[in-house]
Image: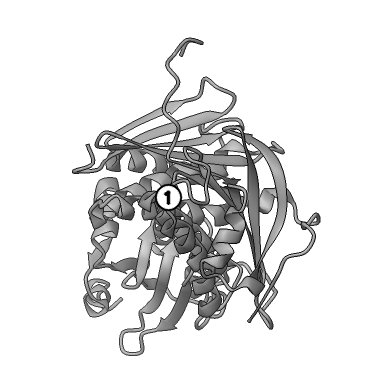
Amino acid sequence: MTVTPRGAPQRDAPARDVIRLRVAEGIVGATALSRMIGIGAARAQLSVTAVDQAMEIADLIADFGPDEVVVAGTLIETSVLPTAGRLELSIGDLRTGGAQRLMDAGAPAATIAVLSTTAVAVAGASGERLAIEITEVGADVSPTPPAGGQGEVGDGHEGRTADFAISTAPDGASGVHVVAVRGEIDIFTAPAVKLAAREAVFSGRNRIVLDLTETTFLDSTGLGVVIGLARLVRPDGDLAIVNTNPTITKTFEITGLDDIFAVRPTLDAAIAALGDG
Amino acid sequence: MTAFAAKPPQADLELVLAARPENVAVVRHVIGGVGDALGMSPQAVADLRLAVSEACTNVVVHAYDDATDETLEVEATLQGDLLNVVVRDFGRGILPRHDSPGLGLGLPLAKAVSESFAVDTTGAGSEVRMAFLVPGAG
């Protein structure tokens, strides 16, 4: 990994790719900032080391008291632009000299450069912005969408929602096909889950277990995949779900879907719920 | 709302990003950080993450069929023991579309896990306003 001072502002990147966060100073703002930088770095497919380094920036800002680097009473605005192998951060508006104070506070001087000092009408003060670019050498620069299918997919592409992977394999003894999802199932990742499950069905398997043991989030988009899958395999086959996550359980209960599918705490119990076919 | 309505307090957090599928996770992680920092219980944070994800997903799916401005805005403000979250778009709004790819479960889910839930489509786009209880913050 190399971290290089940023030169001229990037003009080629479309503004719509920028994620902009404004937060009040304090623990809530610092935590929110840290999470945004963390997921931005993950989406940029940076290594764990680089992600840590990026998140230190949020800690640096939080470590300062009010009015030390930030104009009192203003929101700190951080914009993040994740592209493959590169994360650009821009933090402001800072007091005059605030950018230098942040650099002096611990960020290696070589990693950070003051991009520009611009006069911003915030409480009569001029604002500085601190620009940081973290580049990963040798990063996989293909912005691959999540894929579904045989075997593990998603590993090595920890970009989008951090850690996402689907494994799909027949359970030898029972003939049931097991689709296991690690990570978050939402509008971005659900299509890959749908594709993986449908591939199993179209290859002739109609008894499917969706294993959510390692699934950390499931929203209505994920529920839609589950319902669609059940429609696809029934009435000749069936679908059962493995889940122990109380939040996902609650989602099933609110929507009444726990009455429609067998939801079991273990893979063996879910396979058993499908019977012998 | 009249022109003389009291200006709401400045939000503690504003997030502005493109209304695209990959960005819903960004909002979810940031808002989850807010819940964690406020000391909300794991289940309360999970509810917050789900409700805000659903509101944002709705914007991604419904708001910008043919618009060029695809901005998604999220604001969070702590008022007393309530965390107020506004999810805003500037598109055609969140009214169901006839070819909706979803099942209509999203906003009802958000409503079910939030303390209060309201949709305002009187502006240029639409706003989903939700509140979440933050015990001990009041």
| Residue in the foreground of this view, choosing between B134 and A174 | B134
Q: In screen coordinates, is A103 left or right of B55?
A: right
x, y (%) of residue A110? 66, 74
Label 1 chain ID: A
Q: Secondary structure at mark 1?
A: helix
Res. B24 in view: yes
x, y (%) of residue A216? 36, 65
Residue drawn where x is 45% and y is 20% of the image: B7
Whether residue A159 is situated above or below residue A261 in the rendered picture: below
Determine which quarter of the picture holds residue A41: bottom right
| Residue in the foreground of this view, choosing between A268 and A249 | A249
What amino acid type should be assigned to the residue bearing mark 1? Gly
Q: Where the C terminus of chain B falls, by quadrant?
A: top left
Residue named by callout 1 = A29
Residue drawn where x is 43% and y is 57% of the image: A62
Residue drawn where x is 49% and y is 44% of the image: B56
**Residue located farthest toward the bottom when viewing the structure as drawn:** A172
Determine which quarter of the picture holds residue B42: bottom left
Q: In screen coordinates, is B105 left or right of B70?
A: left
**Residue located farthest toward the left when viewing the structure as drawn:** B136
x, y (%) of residue B95? 51, 30
Residue drawn where x is 41% and y is 45% of the image: B52
Res. A161 in view: no
